[in-house]
């Protein structure tokens, strides 16, 4: 594997001897928090998707042994806490005061001495509902005469917002002038992340009135600020601790009602209160991902040059716009949809609608709608190649933004930092043996066998800020690192992000080891405690490496500056005579005369040059100058069984480029997990609703996660194109594979079905849908 030089850094590849080191979390999860006198909160949930609540009777529940309180929307309304803001400045119920908006919605909270009593209490709460007409289809939601779902917002329809970008007229002209125009409708259904650990929290108020909340959150600081703003509690009296987290994947960015009710219960009972969500609550009531109805048109010249792209999308946002997007971008970074290609013109519009479903627009391992964009562009590019009867690999090679064009400004306004798309695709083609596979396919087709090859050459966009453009609820997106070297050369580093399994304890220590010349096992990494960590926006959108990873390097370099002065003092030369070489402070030209960082650290507390302040530490709040644009080329080969419609992924090759790699093993772990989370929605996962708004996948019998049995074997490789603006050239990688994989798989299946002229089958590609597509044309 290639290892890049650190751009502008110290001229060493990052994976030094440290690659073997892995730090496990302490096994310290929210459910492990056990406090004296702790109570348990469980939630009553609505069986109806839309209904008036005419009565909630608490008395029977309060007679259940161990039950202490039943909290309803009316109780919260008295404290002005029945509603809370969403991340997109919409409003969401904590508990309803009169109407429920989706099946599974929280209706009341039951607080009891343990979780069994709480559960019995939930069963004993009596709620009277009067069902209301249900709206599940966002297209119908926008029709005149549809029931108005959010009259509380003073709205006369169910339309939330319209957002557009690009030059409409120029795109119209360019499409008209194009020799070939294709059009496709793609539906990307609702899905939900399935972290091993569901959401949960423990809320405690101490004798001094300080609120501590241990919670499964990907963004502890932002949550603390929102808690302070919503509750009116002083921010210094709120401590959010995000301990070990068993997977986040975007689902643990929002604030859910359970957290808030637990805090209210702790404030009112004076006892610590724990809430742990069950799996059905997680699958039916947490915010969901995707649910994009995309209509895309793409133009090309006769000889196969892409010209223009026009995209119209309807987004189902459920009953409240709870999307985790920067506030300037209600459809996230969907306008990365021009992908790896230099279109002359593009126009993208998105409309969002309310329906009787849980809050939508939360991510599933995707930075702000990038998966939807990558899927659409790579599906259409493939269809265009087929339409033009060109080989899809050759077609992409002909159209890629060339390496010398970077930094490249896309027609929709993004400035891609670096890329070599042809390099990645070429490597993937070699790895999979592309030409041989195509030959085999020709042979198989002659015999009537269905074999397909699909490509996805995606471009990602990760690492928000720049804080000028990116904010969450007005809080600017930057991130931080605070690095402190103790006298004996040991390090405590605290960062504003929060690992949920990405291995930050390992990789941040490697960055600091590299920059400070200290062994990584001398470096402790801490995240997730708002009382100790510097302010940061948290971990999602693959932003940790581009932001806090950069901050760690910058802080370490700042330490090196001060350390140079101390080393000069120890070596009795001028600071200008010192150079940082081979992880040491050396007198220039005299390799024998040097001091290590550990020598300097001791002197920083014991033997300082006059005039220098004691200590050796630095903090950096890093506001990135640009996003990073990781990319990759994936090639998938499938065999489809004509008789059953079953798909077998025979090979899947993933060549990724995330710039400088900190830890190859962690990156491969991220990519193989990400690929599985790309395979899942392509083939299996979907949360459908019936006409009455019943959630048809509220448990793992119906919501089909791929197990080791279904998951293909991933073949991974890398190219390395460093980011020119990141301190050591790294780009984020955590979501790349989930973004890139689905189109490769679907393209492969449709390529297998080419004899039947099928241009699209909506995901997930069940055997039944494929069988139907085959047999529509071939009735036996
Ligand atoms: N890394 C590296 N070299 C690079 C880039 C990254 O070695 N050039 C390492 C990083 O140092 C880090 C890991 O790879 O240890 C992921 O880094 P990065 O791409 O910066 O992403 P984040 O740390 O910000 O993680 C977020 C990303 C997201 S948004 C989702 S969703 C997701 C994902 O990470 N959720 C995960 N991967 C996950 N992995 C686990 N186990 N659990 C989740 O919840
Ligand atoms: Cu987009 S899912 Mo991740 O950003 O936590």
Image: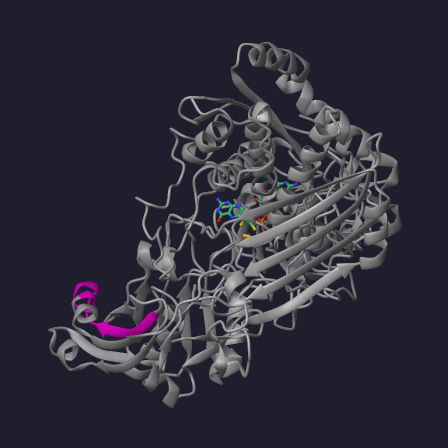
Can residue 517 be seen by looking at this rendering?
yes
**Quadrant in which the C terminus appears:** top left
> What residue is shown at x 45% (from left), y 50% (from top)?
193
The figure's colour scheme reads one colour
Q: Which residues are magenta?
A: 106-119
> What residue is shown at x 78% (from left), y 29% (from top)?
397
The verdict on residue 107 being magenta is yes
Give percent across and percent down for residue 24: 44, 43
Give percent across and percent down for residue 387: 71, 31
The correct choice, above or below, for 349 with respect to 572 in the image is: below
Which of 43 and 28 lies nearest the eye of the viewer?
Answer: 43
Q: Quadrant of residue 343?
A: top right
Give percent across and percent down for residue 293: 57, 53
Left/right placement of residue 747 relative to residue 269 reads: right
Give percent across and percent down for residue 485: 62, 54
The verdict on residue 398 being magenta is no
> What residue is shown at x 42% (from left), y 32% (from top)?
767
């Amino acid at each position: 594997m290639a290892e890049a030089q650190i751009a502008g850094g110290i001229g060493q590849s990052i994976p030094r001897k440290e690659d073997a080191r892995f730090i496990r979390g302490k096994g310290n999860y929210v459910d492990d928090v056990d406090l004296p006198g702790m109570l348990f909160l469980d939630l009553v949930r609505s069986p109806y998707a839309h209904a008036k609540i005419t009565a909630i009777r608490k008395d029977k529940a309060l007679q259940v042994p161990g039950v202490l309180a039943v909290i309803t929307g009316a109780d919260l309304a008295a404290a002005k806490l029945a509603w809370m803001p969403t991340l997109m400045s919409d409003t969401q119920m904590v508990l309803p005061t009169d109407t429920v908006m989706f099946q599974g919605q929280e209706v009341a909270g039951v607080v009891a001495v343990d979780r069994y009593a709480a559960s019995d209490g939930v069963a004993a709460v009596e709620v009277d509902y009067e069902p209301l007409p249900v709206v599940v289809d966002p297209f119908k939601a926008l029709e005149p005469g549809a029931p108005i779902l959010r009259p509380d917002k003073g709205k006369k329809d169910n339309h939330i917002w319209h957002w557009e970008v690009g030059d409409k007229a120029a795109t119209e002209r360019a499409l008209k002038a194009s020799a070939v125009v294709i059009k496709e409708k793609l539906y990307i259904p609702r899905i939900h992340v399935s972290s091993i650990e569901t959401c949960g929290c423990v809320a405690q108020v101490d004798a001094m009135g300080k609120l501590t909340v241990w919670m499964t959150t990907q963004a502890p600081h932002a949550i603390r600020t929102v808690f302070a703003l919503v509750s009116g509690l002083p921010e210094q009296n709120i401590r959010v601790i995000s301990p070990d987290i068993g997977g986040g994947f975007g689902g643990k960015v929002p604030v859910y009602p359970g957290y808030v009710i637990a805090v209210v219960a702790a404030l009112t009972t004076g006892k610590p209160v724990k809430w742990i969500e069950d799996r059905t609550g997680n699958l039916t009531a947490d915010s969901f991902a995707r649910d994009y109805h995309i209509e895309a048109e793409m133009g090309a010249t006769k000889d196969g040059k892409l010209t223009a792209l026009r995209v119209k999308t309807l987004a189902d946002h459920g009953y409240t716009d709870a999307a985790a997007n920067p506030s300037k971008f209600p459809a996230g970074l969907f306008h990365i949809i021009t992908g790896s290609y230099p279109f002359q013109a593009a126009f993208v519009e998105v409309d969002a609608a309310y329906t009787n479903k849980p809050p939508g627009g939360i991510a599933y391992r995707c930075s702000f709608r990038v998966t939807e964009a990558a899927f659409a562009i790579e599906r259409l590019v493939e269809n265009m190649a087929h339409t033009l009867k060109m080989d899809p690999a050759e077609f992409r090679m002909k159209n890629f933004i060339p390496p010398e064009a970077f930094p490249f400004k896309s027609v929709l306004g993004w400035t891609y930092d670096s890329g070599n798309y042809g390099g990645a695709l070429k490597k993937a083609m070699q790895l999979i043996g592309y030409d041989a596979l195509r030959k085999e396919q020709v042979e198989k087709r002659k015999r009537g066998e269905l074999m397909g090859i699909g490509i996805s050459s995606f471009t990602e966009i990760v690492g928000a800020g720049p804080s000028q453009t990116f904010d969450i609820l007005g809080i600017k997106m930057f991130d931080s690192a605070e690095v402190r070297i103790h006298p004996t050369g040991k390090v405590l580093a605290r960062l504003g992000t929060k690992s949920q399994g990405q291995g930050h304890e390992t990789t941040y220590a490697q960055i600091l080891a590299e920059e400070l010349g200290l062994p990584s096992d001398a470096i402790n990494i801490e995240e997730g405690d708002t009382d100790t960590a510097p302010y940061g926006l948290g971990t999602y959108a693959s932003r940790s490496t581009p932001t806090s990873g950069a901050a760690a390097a910058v802080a370490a370099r700042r330490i090196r500056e001060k350390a140079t002065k101390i080393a000069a003092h120890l070596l009795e030369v001028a600071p200008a005579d010192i150079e940082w070489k081979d992880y040491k402070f050396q007198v220039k030209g005299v390799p024998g005369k040097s001091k290590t960082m550990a020598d300097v650290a001791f002197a920083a507390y014991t033997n300082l040059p006059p005039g220098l302040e004691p200590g050796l530490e630095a903090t950096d709040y890093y506001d990135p100058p640009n996003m990073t644009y990781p990319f990759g080329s994936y090639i998938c080969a499938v065999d489809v069984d004509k008789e059953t419609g079953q798909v077998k992924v025979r090979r899947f090759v993933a060549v990724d480029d995330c710039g400088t790699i900190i830890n190859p093993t962690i990156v491969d772990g991220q990519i193989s997990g990400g690929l599985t989370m790309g395979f899942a929605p392509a083939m299996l996962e979907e949360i459908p609703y019936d006409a009455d708004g019943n959630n048809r996948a509220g448990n793992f019998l119906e919501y089909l996660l791929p197990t080791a049995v279904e998951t293909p074997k991933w073949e991974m490789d890398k190219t390395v194109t460093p980011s020119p603006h990141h301190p050591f050239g790294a780009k984020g990688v955590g979501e790349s594979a989930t973004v890139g994989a689905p189109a490769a798989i679907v393209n492969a299946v449709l390529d297998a079905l080419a004899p039947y002229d099928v241009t699209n089958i909506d995901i997930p590609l069940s055997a039944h849908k494929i069988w139907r597509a085959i047999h529509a044309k071939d009735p036996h």
